Amino acid sequence: MAQPLKDMINAQSVSVLADGLAAAWSPFPRDRFVGRALDGLDGLELKDRVRHVAAALANALPLPYPRAAEIVRGCASRAVLDMWSGWPATDHTAVQGLDHLDAAMETLATLTPYSSGEFAVRPFLELYRDDALKIMYAWAESPDEHLRRLASEGSRPRLPWATRVSWLMAPGPTLPLLDRLRDDPSEYVRRSVANHVNDLAKGHPEEALALLARWRADGGSHVEKVLRHAVRGLLRAGHPEALALVGATPGSGAVDVLALESEAVAVGEKLGFSVTVTADGAGPLLLKYAIRRPGSRRVFHLGQREADGAGATFTLRKSHSFRPVTTRDEPPGPRELDVIVNGRVAATTAFTLTPAP
């Protein structure tokens, strides 16, 4: 079983941060910081652990923030920071530096190659809006791919795990960032841009599609890959314009056979099934499937096939896992499996999810 993420904030990660801070500032009370950071840590969940260590850091650096920020920045070049050891330092920046925009943003820029500051930058976007965004526009021009990614990732409208910034939910202010980074040489950056547009598309699909259409018209080495990743949410929802954007004819294609390996599957096991589809004409067939029960419908990727003309036939096989996960409840009971071809439900069959053996 994989190690819980919360356990990555531990004595080792705290020690790495402590060593860097002590190297950056000789009076730093290393042992007091470590003791305070580890006291009660084991009983906390992930983000509470980050806040707990950040609070211990604030207690150990009772200095005016600009001076404390210098020490935190100095730590970055004196310790082998990673996401887990550096995350409390970015959280410290978000809390203690809130009245010092320039020093705090400089600190996030220094830390982000080691531990990305996309969560920590959100309070500054909320409080300072235009001034913070102006700094992020400059980040988008940086030679450092980590900083360019932070410009896109930190300003995402629906950044997972992050606080919502209300004015980011509407398209407009971040578009200059995305235009600058859409064809970035780094896939790390381009993937963030695609995720950013996918976020926009959830609330403003027409604006997101218009943006992507403009990018395609403008050209670029990576535009098609960015486009496909950016519209994945709209494709999952069967949005006709998104389907057309990737060359698929909305509603085209038929399911000839949908066969389950079994009409019942237990919690913890896999449902195997096969699908045979036939194209109505040349072009891509975008295949999804949905698992439905009362009050729940979840859509998953099944595959994509390129038809050279009407009558082209493809067979796909899939196993869907019902392994229990902490973020989703799957109570036993009746289910339906939909197969979706180019945005249209083309076949449905029923099965039963039974209790774990």
Image: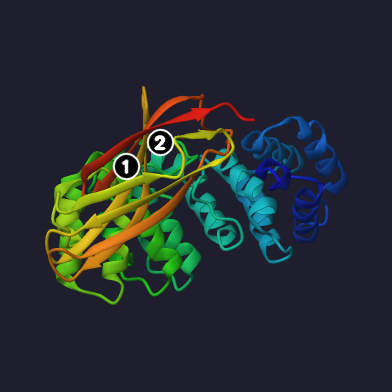
Q: Could you say which is closer to the camera, residue 296 or residue 6?
A: 296
Element assignment for label 2: loop
Q: Which residue is mark 1?
A: 168
Residue at the location (15% across, 63% down)? 311
- Say if residue 136 shows up in the picture: no
- Amino acid type at mark 1: Leu
Q: Which residue is mark 2?
A: 164
Q: Could you say which is closer to the camera, residue 75 or residue 184?
A: 184
| Residue at the extreme right of the image, as rendered | 31
Q: Could you say which is closer to the camera, residue 298 or residue 229?
A: 298
Badge count = 2
Q: Position of residue 37 (x, y in %)?
A: 78, 39
| 251 up-or-down from 268: above or below | below
Cα–Cα span, label 2 and label 1: 8 Å
Element assignment for label 1: helix
Left or right of residue 2: residue 282? left
Asked whether disc 2 touches disc 1, contact meaning CB atoms under 8 Å apart, the reply is yes
Left or right of residue 56: residue 73? left
Residue at the location (19% across, 57% down)? 211
Residue at the location (28% across, 41% down)? 202
Q: Position of residue 160 (x, y in %)?
A: 46, 42
| 281 up-or-down from 318: above or below | below
- Amino acid type at mark 2: Arg
